[in-house]
Image: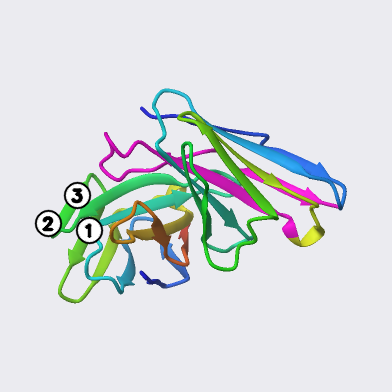
């Protein structure tokens, strides 16, 4: 089945630094990747939609200069949290889909727990 | 845009009993409705899905029903087991896109 790898699984960083999270589709070409944020005991909030070779589309209220998304290839999308602050601490999770073969089913990455101290 | 509401937020059932979680959606053009199970600190796992051209789908102890007219769909788990304890999310596809709009989640506890 489709597999999406996400790294790192956990990261602790100092306030003001930047953190990069990678999301890779291992056995399929991900035409579209999605980045979600999840607060403790809350639902998944869509942050942005990432299409290979084009600029990401951000959801309302998500700062695109704060959360930089790059989808450089059909198998890799990255989310960089720039100048991180404690309020950016959260669980970030990506999902990927191959629109040409999909039946709408997502494959989720394993998630990244970011803690900003 | 699409809006998905999910109820209840928490649900406790005795082992062996049934559990039902309900979701309503707003966009009548939505045509795909997956259900995910998420254990603490882990990724959501797809457990069942249904398309708008089907009214019901079943997979062993899990079933999903869809009422397009009323714009709601439900997850039914029968003969619940302790390992069914998790958070369950419903979702609907925002029409014209592949974006999922998730419900707020239901924390299911199966009591042994």
Quote the CA–CA distance across marks 1 and 3: 18 Å
Give the residues in magenta.
A88-117
The answer to which image quadrant residue B71 occupies is bottom left
Residue B39 painted magenta:
no
Residue most extreme to the front: A54
Residue A98 painted magenta:
yes
Mark 1 and mark 3, same subunit? yes
Residue A41 position, x and y percent, is 59, 62
Q: Residues within 10 Å of mark 3 (few under 14, many from 20)?
A: some
Mark 3 and mark 2, same subunit? yes
For disc 2, the marked residue is B53
Q: Kindly tell me whether residue A91 is visible in this rendering.
A: yes
**Residue name at image x 30 percent, y 74 percent:** B26
Could you tell me which chain the residue with mark 1 belongs to? B
Could you tell whether A4 is left or right of B5 in the image? right
For disc 1, the marked residue is B31
Residue A44 position, x and y percent, is 52, 58
Q: Residues within 10 Å of mark 1 (few under 14, many from 20)?
A: some
Quote the CA–CA distance across marks 3 and 2: 15 Å
For disc 3, the marked residue is B58
Could you tell whether B38 is left or right of A66 in the image? left
Q: Eyeballing the image, is B25 above or below A72? A: below
Q: Secondary structure at mark 3?
A: strand
Q: Secondary structure at mark 2?
A: loop
Could you tell whether A59 is left or right of B102 in the image? right
**Residue name at image x 15 percent, y 74 percent:** B69
Q: Eyeballing the image, is B7 above or below B76? A: below
């Amino acid at each position: 089945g489709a597999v999406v790898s996400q790294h790192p699984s956990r990261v602790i960083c100092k306030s003001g630094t930047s953190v990069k999270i990678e999301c890779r589709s291992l056995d399929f070409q991900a035409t579209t990747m999605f980045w979600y944020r999840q607060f403790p005991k809350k639902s998944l909030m869509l942050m942005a939609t990432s299409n290979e070779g084009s600029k990401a589309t951000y959801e309302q209220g998500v700062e695109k200069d704060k959360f930089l998304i790059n989808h450089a290839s059909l198998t890799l999308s990255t989310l960089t949290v720039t100048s991180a602050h404690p309020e950016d601490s959260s669980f970030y999770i990506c999902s990927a889909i191959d629109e040409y073969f999909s039946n709408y089913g997502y494959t989720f990455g394993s998630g990244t727990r970011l803690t900003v101290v | 845009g699409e809006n998905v509401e999910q109820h209840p937020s928490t649900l406790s059932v005795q082992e062996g009993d049934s559990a039902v979680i309900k979701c309503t959606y707003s966009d009548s053009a939505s045509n795909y409705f997956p259900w995910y199970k998420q254990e603490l600190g882990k990724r959501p796992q797809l457990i069942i899905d249904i398309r708008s051209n089907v009214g019901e789908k079943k997979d062993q102890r899990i079933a999903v029903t869809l009422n397009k007219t009323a714009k709601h769909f439900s997850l039914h788990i029968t003969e619940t087991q302790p390992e069914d304890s998790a958070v369950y999310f419903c979702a609907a596809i925002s029409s014209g896109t592949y974006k999922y709009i998730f419900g707020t989640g239901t924390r299911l506890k199966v009591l042994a």
